[in-house]
Amino acid sequence: MRLNKALEEKKMDIRLRDKLLGEGKLTISEVDSFLRTLADDEDSAVFSAPGSTEKKPVDEESSAEESSPLIN
């Protein structure tokens, strides 16, 4: 019974969710319902640029350019 409970707790884990949706063991409405119950933590979020030690909001355009070094 403990394994079943552990799997139930992990059902919405992004690594399992897509697999379970594909197998029909989870519905999109269940996922939407779960996501609506999550708290909004935007006010406590910290943004930082890759490789930076400063923690501040990052401009979306500059962050997109910096995070894709393979695109010339």
Image (spheres, rainbow, N blue to C red):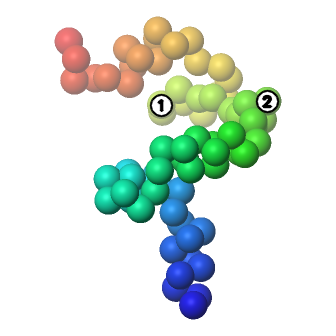
**Which residue does the image show at 57% across and 90% down from the upper left?**
1
Question: Measured from the top left, where is residue 56 in percent x and y?
Answer: 68, 23
Q: Dots 2 and 1: beta carbons under 8 Å?
A: no
Establish if 24 lies above or below 72. Answer: below
- Check disc 1 and give the amino acid type: Pro
Establish if 33 lies above or below 55. Answer: below
Q: Earlier in the sequence, mark 2 or mark 1?
A: 2
Image quarter for residue 55?
A: top right
Q: Dot 2 lies on which element?
A: helix
Furthest residue to the right?
43
**Which residue does the image show at 65% across and 20% down from the upper left?**
57
Furthest residue to the top?
61
Question: Measured from the top left, where is residue 58 in percent x and y?
Answer: 58, 18
User: What crowding class fits label 1: few (fewer than 14 Cα within 10 Å), some (14-19), or many (20 or more)?
Assistant: few
Name the residue carrying label 2.
43
Task: Name the side, left or right, on which 62 lies relative to 9.
Answer: left
Question: Measured from the top left, where is residue 4 in percent x and y?
Answer: 53, 81
Question: Measured from the top left, where is residue 49 in percent x and y?
Answer: 53, 26
